[in-house]
Image (cartoon, rainbow, N blue to C red):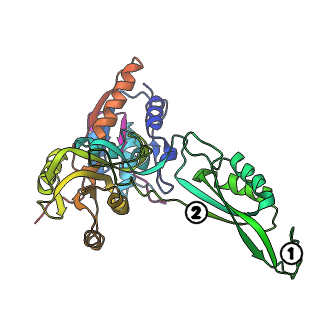
Amino acid sequence: MRLAGITALLDGWYDPSWAEPWDRVGLVCGDPEQEVRRVLFAVDPVEAVVEEALDLGADLLVVHHPLLLTPVSTIAATTAKGRALHRLVRGGTALFTAHTNADVPADGTNDALAGVLGLRDTRVLVPTGDTEGDEGLDKLVVLVPVTHADQVREAVTAAGAGAIGAYDSCSFTVRGEGRFRPLPGAEPVLGQVGGLEVVEECRVEAVLRRGLRHEVVTALRAAHPYEEPAFDLVELVDTGPPRTVAAGGPAAGRADDPAPGARGHGRVGTLPGTVRLGDLAATVAGVLPPTAHGVRVAGDLDRPVRTVAVGAGSGESLLEQARRSGADVYVTSDLKHHRAGEFLEDGGPALLDVAHWAAEWPWLPVVAEKVARAVREEGDTVVTRVSTLVTDPWTSRA
């Protein structure tokens, strides 16, 4: 299969548009027309991995971490990045990166980490949108004269606001009293310049997908009778599933919780049974590749845990979401001293901190198998190998 065919598969599973704005993903070097017979998968594009790819005779190296994440002004072989690129180009090995775009979807790094821990009924910890690429919801609140409320409601609905699940035209309205004084230079629809005006107004509220902000606000301004319409656009946050009691059972989530396989950062699920925190730490150490970092534990080793949140890679930014998810323990990487301490003192779940490299490595066998299977279905073959080189920068403990 040609390189273009392999990259098309990867882009289909891990859409580049799902990457964070600061990220750098996709094909780094290589001719899309070249044949690919061997592929090596690794977390880091470091020199040792490049050597492994060349020794294998790999036509393609697929990595999770970008080689050129930060801008460079040179790729001369006098730098580590330059040497890696020169070796790859000379050896005819293409380089492809799937980073934050591989974190959020089904079969991505977070799903893989949850999978090796044996979590069940997993759901997304922080949703990043539906299949159309929207990233969360906003709420529009607009004040409009009663005489024009229907006009404004219809305009923002036509622009996409007020859609909730299988319903559209959803809004909330309450009447009130608006006051304003037009100043010199104003051209008020109601009232006179210099006079205090009291108007019966409606407060109209509706939700909208964040990607529709521009369209909805434009429609609002066009339909509103005032020169300067008063409105708020509030960015809504995910509060996690509510702790409601199911009949005869423990806490259960809503029917509209993010479905398994939905796109987003982190995952939360349950173990087959309740275990000690210390025993879970030992399990984590056993299923992840061994590193000098090991598994750091913050919390009482005898604490019973069953609901587990995970964040592959650096997951400190998801601490609050892990707390709100109802998790008993959060498994992630790169936690800082002060943030972890404050989190525990504020009643947060226990913490297991693992090596960044180890937390993301379980994704490699998943994507390697997906590539091999998809190529077979196309009637072709490709040899895939997962690198087991430990590229975590911490190599020993004193």
Nearer-the-camera pick, 364 or 220? 220
* Residue 153 point in image, percent of width and height: 72, 52
Q: Which mark is residue 234?
A: 2
Q: Main secondary structure of the magenta part?
A: loop
Q: Amino acid at mark 1?
A: Ala
- Considering only vertical position in the picture, is 177 above or below 287? below
Quarter of the image where the C terminus is located = bottom left
Residue 70 part of the magenta segment? yes
* Residue 374 point in image, percent of width and height: 39, 25
Q: Which mark is residue 367?
A: none
User: Which of the 4 image quarters holds residue 366?
Assistant: top left
Decide if residue 365 is in sight here: yes
Categorize mark 1 by other alpha carbons within 10 Å: few (<14), some (14-19), many (20+).
Answer: few
Nearer-the-camera pick, 169 or 272? 169
* Residue 77 point in image, percent of width and height: 38, 54
Residue at 39 percent across and 20 percent down: it is 377
* Residue 65 point in image, percent of width and height: 37, 50
- Considering only vertical position in the picture, is 284 above or below 4? below
Quarter of the image where the N terminus is located = top left
Q: Is residue 92 left or right of residue 306?
A: right
What residue range appears in magenta? 54-73
- Considering only vertical position in the picture, is 12 above or below 376? below
Residue at 78 percent across and 53 percent down: it is 151
Q: Separation of disc 1 and disc 2 at Cα?
A: 28 Å
Nearer-the-camera pick, 196 or 261? 196
Q: Is disc 2 placed on a helix, strand or loop?
A: strand
Residue 142 part of the magenta segment? no
Q: Is residue 134 left or right of residue 172?
A: left
Q: Which residue is mark 1?
A: 186
Farthest residue to the front: give it: 247
Q: Is residue 83 left or right of residue 165?
A: left
Residue at 24 percent across and 55 percent down: it is 392
